[in-house]
Amino acid sequence: RGTMTVGEMAKALHKDASEVIKKLLFLGVMATINQELDLDAIQLLASDYGVEVELKIPVEEDKFEQFEEKDEEEDLMERPPVVTIMGHVDHGKTTLLDAIRKTNVTEGEAGGITQHIGAYQVETHGKKITFLDTPGHEAFTSMRARGAQVTDITIIVVAADDGVMPQTIEAIAHAKAAKVPIIVAVNKIDKPDSNPDRIKQELTEYELVPEEWGGDTIFCNISAKQRIGLENLLDMILLVAEVQEYKANPNKRARGTVIEAELDKGKGPVARVLIQHGTLKVGDSFVAGVCFGRVRAMVNDKGKKLKEAGPSTPVEITGLTEVPQAGDPFLAFEDERKARAIAEKRAITLRQSEMGANSRVTLDDLYKQI
Ligand code: GTP
Ligand code: MG
């Protein structure tokens, strides 16, 4: 897809077009002055001139913050931490989440593999913790990456009978990129061939060093299956939450993120949303990604009907006109017309960027370094 013409590129580089054409020819690209260069050619050319190219493709940005009411320090109140469980395939993520909820999710799932990001809330010592269940397969990496954006704390599950695996490393990278605290749950310690100390040793290579070895990473030895060490794990989550002081203003319009969404035969489009700021109420108008809606009904993870939901609460809502996408931003509006207009505008912007009309590299996007 074309992004910038040879002429524009020459101008950006402060070079003669003819010189750039010659250089391109030398690099194996035949081009005329009005020809659009692809990203590879631009990159190649730029590096040949010792110039660094920074690509800024103006995709549909999350501009929801601009509509959100600003918070004063005194508006902020404690909210439950949002915890994501990550780790390699079969290391026990679903079993752990399941054990924490004391229900049985693994058996009901197709092939025992988690297909979606589900969200649940549990209560311990009178404090709530919100969990996001993330799938473990490579194919869901991007979804998991989005999962990390809504999360406060990442639990990395490593099977003590297996060790640090590619998706363990990936999970660490995601958590580090999202700058969220990591708690390592060394799982399957009930297995005779498990070796928790080896896991600790292996993880020091990734700068996850346990406190007893002079580091600051919390390690919990657990057995999700035998339900060993789970209380301690929950306590450690609350400890991290206490230190980090997660807060939000519950007294404003809701903002959050779509965790998953689908078309339900009976209910129509259904979205599972994590409320992150404010409070969502039945009857509120909202925008979810490029979709518009009005909360018709709202239930929590236990299937209980709610009239309203505050920060860190995962809810399932109906009343959408379309099915939004996992990871879509969500924002409630007082004004239904405004919500509809914004959803429509976002839909148009998205279509344009998909058609490439927005993905042209502008001159401002080229930075001369030398
Ligand atoms: P994916 O969703 O496929 O990535 O896997 P997962 O990480 O969710 O693993 P899951 O919870 O499905 O567990 C995989 C297998 O390990 C299952 O057979 C579990 O019963 C088993 N398992 C999980 N935790 C433990 C544990 O603490 N001890 C033992 N012995 N087995 C466990
Ligand atoms: Mg699973």
Image (cartoon, grey):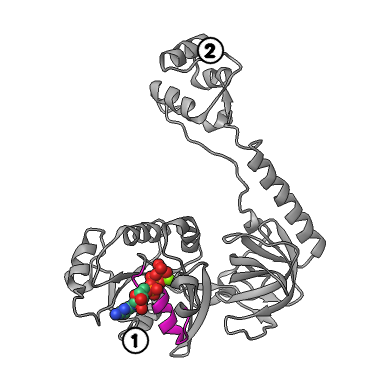
Mark 2: give few (<14), some (14-19) or many (20+) Cα within 10 Å.
some
> Measuring 64% from the left and 63% from the top, which residue is drawn there?
330
Task: Establish whether ligand 1 lies closer than 8 Å to the Cβ of label 2.
Answer: no
> Measuring 42% from the left and 75% from the top, which residue is drawn there?
94
- The answer for how far apart the CA atoms under marks 2 and 1 are is 69 Å
Query: Where does residue 43 sit, x and y in percent of width and height?
Result: 45, 28
> Measuring 42% from the left and 57% from the top, which residue is drawn there?
138
Tell me the mark number nearer the camera, choosing from 2 and 1.
1
Vertical relation: 189 (above or below) 270: below
Image quarter for residue 230? bottom left
Query: Where does residue 218 sit, x and y in percent of width and height?
Result: 29, 73
Image quarter for residue 173? bottom left
- Magenta span: 90-105
Foreground pick, 285 / 269: 269
Image quarter for residue 259? bottom right
Quadrant, the N terminus:
top right
Image-quarter location of ligand 2: bottom left
Mark 1: give few (<14), some (14-19) or many (20+) Cα within 10 Å.
some
Q: Earlier in the sequence, mark 2 or mark 1?
A: 2
Query: Where does residue 114 sit, x and y in percent of width and height?
Result: 47, 69
Amino acid under disc 1: Arg
In the figure, is residue 265 to the left or right of 224?
right
Q: Which residue is mark 1?
A: 227
The answer, for residue 85, to whether it is visible in the render is no
Q: Secondary structure at mark 2?
A: helix
Q: Which residue is mark 2?
A: 17
Q: Please, which residue is most extreme toward the front here? A: 111
In the figure, is residue 292 to the left or right of 289?
right
